[in-house]
Image (cartoon, rainbow, N blue to C red):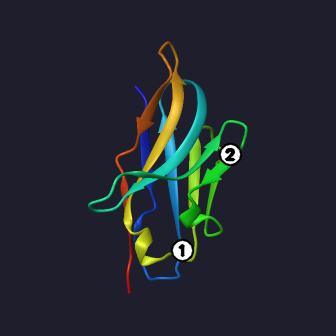
Amino acid sequence: QVQLVESGGGLVQPGGSLRLSCAASGSIFITYAMGWYRQAPGKQRELVAAITIGGSANYADSVKGRFTISRGNAKNTVYLQMNSLKPEDTAVYYCNADLRPTGFARSDYWGQGTQVTVSS
């Protein structure tokens, strides 16, 4: 059974920084991509950033130049470095993995979410 566990959320002042971490565990044959989504109250979940198995990254226009996604040295880990945070970045952030568990079909997996609040 595949599980994604996130950490690193919290309360930060505007202009501050946070680093989110996500680790996927279980019997994983291959991970095609990992990414971060966010959902603010009353809004739809949106892609923040994603990175492929080859290292290609893409970002939402609203976070380009401020957020950086990276893969960890440990297998199936991903980080999101968030700098110059704005109040509009406040949301629940979800880790996503597009992967194929050993013996099973390729599918999307989600973490439980971590709250990020940007406020003075």
- Judged by depth in the image, the label closer to the viewer, 2 or 1, is 1
The percent position of residue 99, horizontal first and vertical second, equals 53, 29
Q: Residue at x 48, y 17 (%)?
A: 105
Rendered view: 83 above or below 59: below
> Which picture quadrant has residue 111?
top left
Q: Amino acid at mark 2?
A: Asn
The percent position of residue 47, horizontal first and vertical second, equals 49, 51
Q: Nearer the viewer, residue 80 or 7?
A: 80
Q: Is residue 51 left or right of residue 87?
A: right
How many residues crowd around disc 1 within 10 Å: few (fewer than 14), some, or many (20 or more)?
A: some
Q: Amino acid at mark 1?
A: Ser
Per the image, label 2 sits on a secondary structure element best described as loop
**Viewport quadrant of the C terminus:** bottom left
Q: CA distance from mark 2 to mark 1?
A: 22 Å
Q: Is residue 49 left or right of residue 107?
A: right
Residue extending furthest toward the top: 103
Q: Nearer the viewer, residue 28 or 92?
A: 92
Precedes in sequence: disc 2 or disc 1: 1
Q: Give the residue number, with chain letter if any, for mark 2.
A: 73
**Viewport quadrant of the N terminus:** top left
Q: Give the residue number, with chain letter if any, for mark 1.
A: 17
